[in-house]
Amino acid sequence: MYKTTIGLEIHAELKTESKMFCSCKNDPDEKTPNLNICPICLAHPGVLPTINKKAVESIVKVGLALNGKIGNPSKFDRKNYFYPDLPKGYQISQYDEPFVVGGSLNGVKLTRIHLEEDTARLQHGADGKSSYVDYNRAGLPLMELVTDPDIKSADEAYDFAKELQLILRYLGVSDADMEKGQMRVEPNISVSKTDKLGDKVELKNINSFSAVKNAIAYEVDRQINALEAGEKIKQETRGWDDVKMETFSQRTKENAHDYRYLPEPDLPPVEISADILESLKIEIPELPAEKRRRFVAEYGLNESQASILAADRYLAAYFEEANSEKEKATPQLIFNYITSDLLSLVNSAGLGITESKISPAHLASLVDLAESGTLNSRKAKDLLKRMWDTGLSTEEILSQEDITQIGDEGVLMETILRIIDDNPKAVEDYKKGKEVSLKFLIGKAMAELKGRGNPELLKKLFLEHLTK
Ligand code: ZN
Ligand code: MN
């Protein structure tokens, strides 16, 4: 029986106004190459970096949220290596005094979380001979989280990465979109029959959550099969091919000391005062795990329902606001209306829940009526659609309907009497048994009412009057 051991290295781009060490705009989506650049992020001689305060605050918040120890002081180091996407010939990163040491998430221990700068983006020409470098991304603030080798399966790794993404979004420090490269997950994997760890393989270019699962599962199988066949596992970096669904060898692993880390002489160590630490703590919102627990306890939802809501903090907030506005409705029914009917309207309009045209209070009042049985579910769904289209509340729509109906009865009778006076021939014909004349009279009345008359009510009133 083989034991799988997985550790994760996760990079996430932090959402700040400017880059990590200069005032260039932090815009990873910028399409025009080399627009957001300056002598500092291009590493011209003689320039000096300055530390982005917001980036430091962001990583400290992540550390606090994950119960890590905040390094105080903490310092930057140069990680020396050459690659065309690295203008300085070294990356400003952190070595022995990172901003965060330890902590845990989903029961997985964290080794550290540090702050560094992102590299430029390389684009290789179709001719296979040329390469382009876009420095817009060079120097963006990047956090790197490293876990202990605590993870036992592809599923656990997937859950960890998902939960981290959610926490980064709750904290508002990163959008952490894997498809956009804002979050990059690099698992290292080894299998062993004994307690001694096997040689590990690091996986790169995994750019979706499903690929996290697939790549690890593939690699675990590959290593077990190799060992079973009497081969030795090479310590190396392997890429993930999303089309072939397999890993492939990229290069043998460099050792950490190859980077010749040395303290960054142009940046002072960073001390975070107790006051700042306290104010950052206050800014940390309720985190997803706590929210899920509370939604089960407070609203009686089941765990999967609580997870659906907690997966989007704005959706969770909408649900809570609707609950605080409701009278009779159960949280369960509010959950149902939000997740099925409302979300389908929101999604098909291509909007987010915060842009919903139905406010939580309006939704609550509708679900109240549905709960009390005043509205059947079909009528409630109809109303929801009309609330979406008009932006009106349930009461406003219903009272408008009432007014038209009550008002109509008066208006209808007036119209009916006039039509009868004006069309004595049709009235005669109907009284002689010509059914089609009734339709003619109703049609006349409907035309006069510009189609707004209730046809059934019209017929009933005509009949009452004509048989008198
Ligand atoms: Zn710059
Ligand atoms: Mn890194």
Image (cartoon, rainbow, N blue to C red):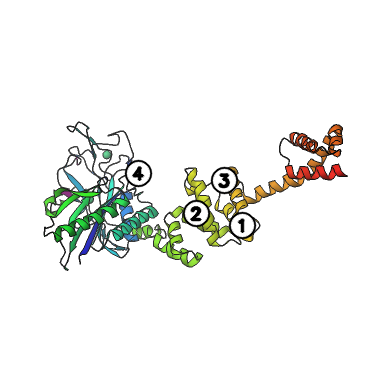
Instruction: Pick the quarter of the image with the C terminus.
Output: top right
Residue 82 located left or right of residue 308: left
Q: Are marks 3 and 2 in contact (CB under 8 Å)?
A: no
| The disc label shown at residue 339, or none | 2
Circle nearer the N terminus (4, 2) = 4
Disc 1: which residue: 370
Identify the secondary structure beneath mark 2.
helix
Work out whether residue 188 can be spotted. no
| Residue at 59% over, 52% down | 362
Circle nearer the N terminus (3, 2) = 2
Circle nearer the N terminus (4, 1) = 4
For the magenta stretch, what is the residue range?
A: 78-87
Label 3: few (<14), some (14–19) or many (≥20) C-alpha neighbours in 10 Å: some
For discs 3 and 4, the disc positioned in front in the rendered view = 3
Q: Which amino acid does label 3 sit on?
A: Trp
For discs 4 and 2, the disc positioned in front in the rendered view = 2
Work out whether residue 203 can be spotted. yes
| The disc label shown at residue 17, or none | 4
Picture coordinates of residue 427 (x, y %)? Answer: 85, 36
For discs 4 and 1, the disc positioned in front in the rendered view = 1
Residue 374 located left or right of residue 35: right
Identify the secondary structure beneath mark 4.
loop
Query: In whole angstroms, how far apart are the C-alphas of marks 1 and 3?
Result: 17 Å
| Residue at 83% over, 45% down | 464
Q: What residue type is labelled 2?
A: Thr
